[in-house]
Amino acid sequence: MTVMTVMTVMTVMTETTKQTAMTEYEIKKELLLKTHEIIEKANSVFNVSINMPYVSYKLKGRCAGQHVTSKSEIRYNVGLATENWENFLENIVIHEVAHYVTYNLYGTLRTRKGKIISHGDKWKYVMTKLGCKNIKRCHTYDVSKVSQSRTKSTARFQYKCDCRFHNLKQLKHKRARLGTSYICNVCHTKAIFIKQLSE
């Protein structure tokens, strides 16, 4: 092995060790700092004064990041950030901050039919101005390690009104248990829970 090869191997090992050695606290701190850095860049580039959004880390599953307009909040998936650190920092953070900046600059953008445009020309323009070279709508991370199982429940629950039986799925049964009333379209009486039909 040459000296250059040994140094390259040592650099790669150091970077890998550094990445795995980061605690969840350090990852969250770096994500917050990067978010702040990009907001400051946006303020400078667009000559505006956009406030720092609330940053949370409660996102799970397949989604890497999310901008919640109604709460001025950006959410990050710490699991995916940990697995894809460099790319996450350079792409996902800019992607989500670009949504926040676009909303602050242009408001909610809609098509003529009223559909919200999340990844339109204005967003792409903001992404470019913020220095993103890889403008994509979705990430391509391996989500097998962080993704929760999303198998749908096949449980059925029997309810009865004055004229017939109704079989409800788990979600409607849960809502009924929390107070939602289901009224029969035929006899217009409330359906009452009888029994669980299947698991």
Image (tube, rainbow, N blue to C red):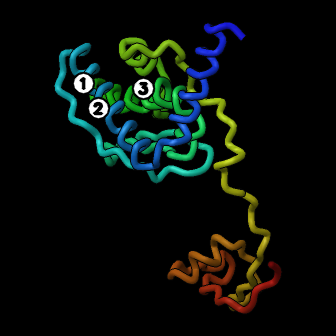
Q: Residues within 10 Å of mark 2 (few under 14, many from 20)?
A: some
Q: Residue at x 82, y 80 (%)?
A: 198
Q: CA distance from mark 3 to mark 2?
A: 11 Å
> On the rendered structure, is 49 left or right of 38?
left
Q: Position of residue 170 (x, y in %)?
A: 69, 73
Q: Secondary structure at mark 2?
A: helix
> On the rendered structure, is 16 left or right of 78?
right
Mark 3 or mark 2: which comes first in sequence?
A: 2
Q: Secondary structure at mark 1?
A: helix
Amino acid marked by disc 1? Glu
Q: Which residue is mark 1?
A: 40
Is the residue under label 2 in contact with that under label 3 (CB below 8 Å)?
A: no
Q: Position of residue 174 (x, y in %)?
A: 60, 77
> On the rendered structure, is 108 left or right of 81?
left
Q: Toward the viewer: 58 or 99?
A: 58
Quadrant into which the N terminus falls? top right
Q: Which residue is mark 3?
A: 94
Q: Position of residue 142 (x, y in %)?
A: 69, 37
Q: CA distance from mark 3 to mark 1?
A: 12 Å
Amino acid marked by disc 2? His
Amino acid marked by disc 3? Ile
Q: Residues within 10 Å of mark 3 (few under 14, many from 20)?
A: many
